Amino acid sequence: MIRWLPRILLGSLTLSTALFAAGGGQDDPRYWLQRMVDAARSVSFSGDLVYVQGPQLDALHIVRLHDGGEQHERLYSLSGPDREILRDGRQVTRIFPADQAVMVDQSEGRRRLTDLTSDQITHLESWYSVSLDGEDRIADRPAVRVEIEPRDEHRYGYKLWLDRDSGLLLRSQMKSLDGDVLEQFMYVEIRFNEIDRKAVASSVNHEGFRYLGVESETRPPRSGEWTANDLPAGFRLLSEGWWRMPGVKDIVRHQMYGDGLGSVSVYIASDIGKPFHGQSSHGAMHVVGHVIDDHQVTVVGDVPLGTVKRILKGLEYRH
Amino acid sequence: MNRPYDEQVSALLDGELPAAELKLLLRQAQRDQMLGARLSRYVLIRDALHRNLPRVVEDGLADRVANALAAEPVHEIMRRPFSTVQPRRWVQSIGGLAIAASVSMAAVVLWPVQQSVQDGGQTSVVQTADVNAGSSASGVQTVASENIRWDRLDPDVQARLNGYAITHDEQSAGRQVGIVPRHVRITGQGTDQ
């Protein structure tokens, strides 16, 4: 059965693209969004990209291999301190050689069942205006431009450049309500050649590094209910889980809300430790914290600050 | 001889004042205008030390900073849901100062994760907390956009928020349309010192 999985997966992806093709075809921006999602799940490649956030510019190299229905990836920095992130199916390993630290997250497999569906892409149009915006050239390849504009102030806008041949996302911009670019990345070179397994293995010997694990936990007994009573239209609960995380003694409750593009995480810890009150912003990502009912509540989101604050304000705890 | 509330004011500026004591301090500041004025001055001094002040410091800046903080959105949003009392206007300013102080001290470097450990407790800040969103428009105070070392940043708070931000980025990537390839944000945030 296992050996048939890649073919079944590929078949379902082709089918979903074909369904959109049967609808609006290449003139329909949803067709291109579906192709982008499909390409992210199935296309193997290697390339160099630049990532810009505010005044900060970074260069990175990426190698992605889809093999046996699983994704393997190696991403490492080409500028500044060494940083390397490896994905090996379910496990994500983040290596910070300068800090002699390794952060391992084994939660990856839980998400596969909730990957984006074509229904969700259609759903986006309730909250965003999606349109095609001509053609361009990225990394010396023809690209289709897709404009995604928010219909209200609760979310950011986006501009996407998709590879005309593969559908892969070659460039993206996240834009504020005023149209300012908050964050963007762009491939400067990309190769769709055959990827060797060795190319997605780490080159860093991290033996002896400090280990920082992020592990999922079962729901603790007598944990009350936290409800977000004031979600902006279109946002819904995507997941809820309990995690053991570095820097927090007790298990942390994590709720994730999203509208298909923007997302907000709510972290609730009964171990307040040193309380975090207030806010901080880092490019397009905002963090707001407060102590509510003897819990440290921290809301993190790549949405406008007002949306993050609104969700924090609307949280309610029931014992 | 120490003046009353010296220890609490010092702890507040260090971002180490427990929530219960913060309430008491604010309540006292409501009754004691001298204490309120002292808090304003100390916050200004701290901001000057951290290069957050405009190049030209004008007369009446303290009052304008206090007014700006009173109107600051952070203060408004934080005060409404969790407080049942409606403090007087200048008390709101003090509340704003308290939040500004705690946020400044807890301003996070989302990446890299363990920078503070390596630096022996010192940490680079990629972008300062946007605590003056309401004041920049008035021209009263600007937030430094360059990187600032926050030697007194609490490494525990930073480590916790780093973990949250990274997990958020990782978790959201699998559930939403991927606008930035997974992990690029994490890997691409570490060059500023």
Image: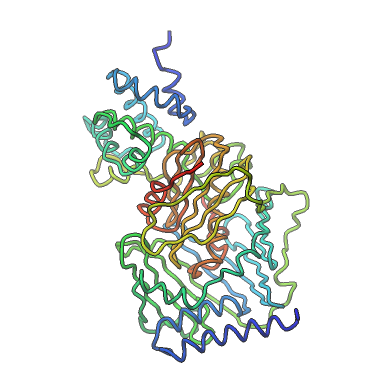
Instruction: Between residue A242 and residue A246, name the one nearer to us.
Output: A242
Q: Is residue B48 left or right of residue A109?
A: left
The residue under the point 45% across, 19% down is B7
Instruction: Between residue A259 and residue A289, name the one nearer to us.
Output: A259
Is A161 situated above or below A95?
below
The residue under the point 21% across, 30% down is B59
The image position of residue B8, as x and y in percent, is 44, 21
> Within the image, what quadrant is residue B48 found in?
top left
Instruction: Between residue A123 and residue B110, name the one nearer to us.
Output: A123
The image position of residue A164, as x and y in percent, is 48, 86
As drawn, the residue found furthest toward the right would be A207
The image position of residue B147, as x and y in percent, is 45, 46
The image position of residue B49, as x and y in percent, is 40, 32
The residue under the point 41% across, 73% down is A123
As drawn, the residue found furthest toward the bottom would be A22
Colouring scheme, one of rainbow, by chain, secondary structure, one colour: rainbow
Report the quarter where the N terminus of chain B lies.
top left
